[in-house]
Amino acid sequence: MSPPPAAEPGAVDRETAAEPAARLVDVVKDYRLRRSSLFGSRETLQAVAGVSLTIARGRTLGLVGESGSGKSTVARLMMRLVTPTSGSVEICGTDVTHLHGTALRRMRQRAQMVFQDPYSSLDPLSPLKDSISEPLRTQLTMTRAERAERVVELLRQVNLRPPYADRYPNEMSGGQLQRAAVARALAPRPELLVLDEPVSALDVSTQAQVINLLQDLQVELGVAYLFIAHDLSVVRHISHHIAVMYLGRIVENGPADQVYEHPAHPYTAALLSAIPVPDPVRQRLPRIVPVRGDIPSPTDPPSGCRFRTRCPFAMDICREVAPPPFRTPSGTVTHCHLHEHGPRLCGRSVTELEATDVPTARADAEAE
Amino acid sequence: MAVDATPSIADDAPGTATSGQSRFRRAGKRMLRNSPAMIALGYLVIVGLAAVLADAITPYDLAVATGAPLASPSGEHWLGTDSLGRDVFTRLVYAGQVSLRISVTVVALAVALAVPLGLVAGYRGGRVDYLMMRICDAFASFPALILMLAVAGILGPEPQNTIIALLVVMLPGLVRIVRGQAVAVRAETFIEASRSIGTPDWVIMGKRMLPSVASPVIVQATVLLGTAILAEAGLSYLGLGTQLPTPSWGNMLRESYDTALFSDPFLVVLPGAAIALTVLAFNTVGDGLRDAFGIANQGPKGRSQRRGITTVTRRKPATPAPALATDDLLRVEGLRVEFDSGTGPVTVLDELDLTIRPGEVLGLVGESGCGKSVTALAISRLLPSPPGRITAGRVVLDGTDLLGLSLTQMRRIRGRQVSMIFQDPMTSLDPAFSVAHHLIEAQRNHGRVDRATAKRRAVELLDLVGIPAATRRMQQFPHELSGGMRQRVMIATALANNPRLLIADEPTTALDVTVQAQILDLLRSLQKELQMAMLFVTHDLGVIADIADRVAVMYAGQVVEQATVHDVFASPRHPYTQGLLRAMPSSLTPPGERLATIPGTVPMAHAFPTGCRFAARCDYASDRCSQAPVPLVEPDGKTLVRCVLAEPAGPVPLADPVPAARPTEEAT
């Protein structure tokens, strides 16, 4: 059973008692695939297998995962671009799970999205002012002059000069264009911004500009972020809380520095040790948590704990029972048997373990 | 937040040179340059005007005999008279009016119906799309001619029935085309973005999808006009279309054929020529529009590109490579690469020097556009020519200058002494062949090996790269493997013949982080075990720290710093390297604090400044920097730096003159 929503990390913002900017409760999203053969049964892909998370107003939740983790689906569930199979989605206290039509469109004023590739997320055949003012035309009644004024204001907020309003996307650099995409997202003054890998397609020096901008905007406008990325060091820099996803489930969710420095789940530790650091001495030390094999297919996830086929600390119980949530003293919630069985970490970091500490039952050879 | 006030050196950022022009204007310009299309267009304009002004320009009544039958062309009757003594010119012009009116009506109706239907089908998908497409399929399964004749025959010969018959035959095809284009646009992210903004569906279809659909529809409509003329002519010829005495080109053709084939064949030629020329003109204009809009761009490929080797055009005759003074495995000296662009040749790599010693890993690092991939491809001469060309320099591998070799000689080197692995594992393996085939072919290409031996070695190679259950894997195909597995197979293929140098072009960029870590561990251990040299190209400084022995940092087509990996990270000497390291979120910058950024953007290849190419973005820049090209110097015997501040005297200060918070946001 998942803990009551109020206990979710990130939920309680002690300064204001306002309802959170976004909340997902036990959200599941299944996709039915084509039949494998004429008489075979349809496979179900469980992209999101019961995810609960909360984003407080004006705070950033970083969501990290690799391919097949379901993080992009979570983004789209939060934006209600897809409908959950079960569970509920709340934006600013309003249950939007089953909204359609005009009501759904009105909700969109409060949550906006920024996508990974600015060259394909902005209409290449329209000048920027058209794209940036699109939310204004849809959501608000403004005269053309008012819209033009707001577009200039938005451009200034993202450090682009007003003449850029007349440019086309193919005339701008990646960093400039991503900033224009942020401007578009801010146009209806949303409470929540969902950013799906917003800097992954940019060069390092441009990433820094966009990250700085996002931080400044959060302070200035009080907007909450769901920041999705695969790069933990970027996520750590900008997030107040971090949630780590693997194969459709959240495996760890806690304050950013706790998750980064004292990971309570082997997968988080594996991710951290896999990130190449720009330090040749540290980088060449043997990896702290080596990970075996490849990510299993989401259509056929392992039983019990989904990470067990690659986990260096896997035990017998991991095959049988999906790990329940465990709350560490520092406020992190993790799903791993190591805390209550075997070495009984009870909230300490996984990095304290050696592989020999664990009576390992060999996990099944990775299915491929 | 302050507004950016500093102009950047490349203010008109990457992209086409045209700014803000709608693509219709661009297409129009391209059309103007296309002579056959313009001539055809001129012809159509004349015919169209003649049809519209028929009353004004025709001297006679079209139904009344005004001269002797079958008279030859004369001053009174410019094209003579027909078998009933009517003026042929008058009838021809009115026939054009009829034919054009029908075909324009048909195509206009077809477009007006097909566009909304196709857009809805493409946007909605699912059952709506399925239903519409099956209906189109049903109509398309009838032979078009028969369907048209049947409809016209059943309905009768009035002009509106001709229109209906033609519409029935042409509409399904046009709907398919619109729907196909709509489906393609629907998958684009900006449509999803519009949905996430809350834009109503019909606005998305009209404003975001319609413009993308417009170009193919315009092209197709033009061609359809020609088809409609032909179809109408056919129907009229058979007596199912326009009925005499109203002339149309088709029934004029029939009439002349019946009455005057041997007595006055000129009368048969005239309407036939009118039909043929008009249809030809529509097709030519349609082709011209297709080219102008850039649909289905198939440029002519140069011979060199098909040959699979980069053209080398060096102005000085290449001096024979001197006996190697050092024991370098690979020496790149003064390499210059040019690319053909719309505005002339552009020098992308300039006087590039690199060395790799046997068994050493050289990391080539830089951001997008710096030329690192071009370098890697140029070394193995895999740059496509056109548009690429090597115009100067030498690439000396073990005493042989690779730039002087023929394709056959180069092929002997590729895969044997020099192997390459690429970024995208999805496309680097041939999907039609099994893993075993890739590995066996790699060996047999370079020597006579019998299949059994090659097969055994293939299994060994798969074990070497850490693929479990190797024998089973041999039979699998690339699509059955994950990204990490495919990359391992590619590495195995590259190692099949024990190359001395492995060139890796961003081999881990497309992989998940945990898989990337495994592949890097694998490459590192293989490199040590096989004592193989590696040129490792990447944009990720962390990966460089993992695997490189020495590092070359590239910026704007030049190497700006070259040092051992420890030196580059511990004491970077070039301001660009320093800036890169500081811009990465890492333990250097506490979370929540602003990251140090590098102001400005990379200069574009056609606008490289003469002096230091980084000067416009550099905190230490002075006038000295922009005066003359800056050479690579070796201030302390081990590091190479391209910076005026790197006097042999003392090290460049590791920075601090950069203020921690910049007063104006640099941005560009």
Image (cartoon, coloured by chain):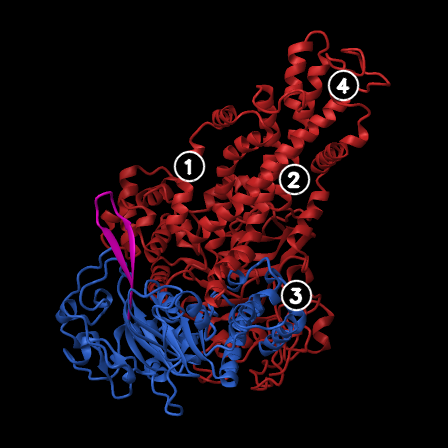
Q: Chain of mark 2?
A: B
Q: Residue at x 37, y 54 (%)?
A: B491
Whether labels 1 and 4 belong to a single chain: the reply is: yes
How many C-alpha atoms fall within 10 Å of the one at disc 4: few (<14), some, or many (≥20)?
few
The overriding secondary structure of the stretch rendered in magenta is strand
- As rendered, which of A263 and B232 lies closer to the eye? B232
How far apart are labels 1 and 4 at the CA level?
47 Å
Residues indicated by labels 3 and 4 sit on the same polypeptide chain: no
What's the residue at 33%, 81% (across, down)? A259
> Judging from the image, what is the letter of the chain drawn in blue?
A
Q: Which of pointers 3 and 4 indicates the residue nearer the eye?
A: 4
Cα distance in 3D space between marks 3 and 4 = 61 Å
Q: Position of residue B188 (x, y in %)?
A: 48, 57
Q: Is B516 on the left-hand or right-hand side of A326?
A: right
Q: Residues within 10 Å of mark 3 (few under 14, many from 20)?
A: some
**Residue type indicated by callout 1:** Asp
Residue B288, labelled with which disc? Answer: 2
In the rendered image, which residue does mark 4 sit on?
A: B64
Q: With A302 as the anchor, is B502 left or right in this view?
A: right
Residue to which mark 1 is pinned: B137
Going from N to C along the chain, the mark reached first, 2 or 4, is: 4
Q: Are marks 3 and 2 in contact (CB under 8 Å)?
A: no
